[in-house]
Amino acid sequence: MIQTPVFFIKSKSESYALFPKLSDEETYTQCSTIQNALILKPTFELYHSFLHTQVSDMSHIHNHLSLRHMQHFNVILKHYKQKIDLKLLQDITSKREVTKIWQSYLVIQNDFFDLKEPFEIPNNSYTKKVLHKVKYKLQNPNSSYLQFLSFITMSIHAFNYRNLQRNYNFTCKLFIPFLIPHRIFKLILEYSTDKKKRQETLSQVNRLSS
């Protein structure tokens, strides 16, 4: 089974920023096969699998279906079902303001892999819309409609409160109207001068949108 080493998590800035501020003893455990190696405990391995595909890879924004991460999620769940702390997962996703994304992911997982226990699968209008868009994209991979939605969602995501806070570390929301133009100018400058970064970003967007 693939398990995630601690150093890998701490090198992923966006995912690590969404990890709970707990002690290493609460979050990690000793690997049984590699001496002096720490790995995530099952609850956090499950959470990391969700973060990796839905947040870091932006699958939620692009209505992308990552079967590799979905399979990883299910393997962890199958092997460690009794060790998964559902209450803790609910608390973490709520505090990190990713509850809607988490619930949508459970609905997608349940539709394709029939999760059932131990989760209560949410059934609301938002999760239904997300599942509909994922299935629609499977049937219409080059949909201009979904590509347009992805562009709009990415634009909102780039300038939301959390991302601005991470980039500028401000203490008062009154600064936001002044920071957005600065952020736009900074991004334009970066992508106009850094050819490699521009190509990598365009490649990722094309990959996730295809």
Image (cartoon, helix red, strand yellow):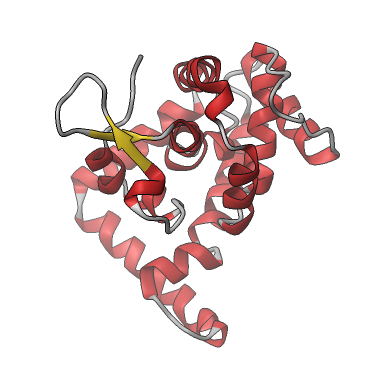
Q: Residue at x 63, y 31 (%)?
A: 105
| 13 lies above or below 187 | above
Relative to 31, does residue 183 appear above or below in the rendering? Answer: below
- State how many labels appear: 0
- Residue 30, by quadrant, is top left
Q: Where does the N terminus fall, quadrant-wise?
A: top left
Instruction: Classify residue 117 as left or right of residue 187.
Output: right
Q: Residue 48 or 22: which is nearer the viewer?
A: 22
The structure residue drawn at horizontal position 63% and vertical position 16%, both measured from the top left corner, is 138
What residue is at 36 percent from the left and 38 percent from the top?
Answer: 202
Q: Is residue 68 left or right of residue 195?
A: right
Q: Is residue 184 left or right of residue 70?
A: left
Camera-side residue of 38 and 141: 38
Q: Residue furthest left?
A: 35
Task: Return the x and y of residue 83 as percentages of the image width and height.
Answer: 53, 29
Q: Quadrant of residue 130?
A: top right
Residue 192 placement: quadrant: bottom left
Q: Residue at image x 40%, y 66%?
A: 166
Q: Position of residue 43 (x, y in %)?
A: 50, 35
Give how far across and how far down residue 187 sits, in percent.
Answer: 35, 62
State the residue in front, 186 or 89: 89
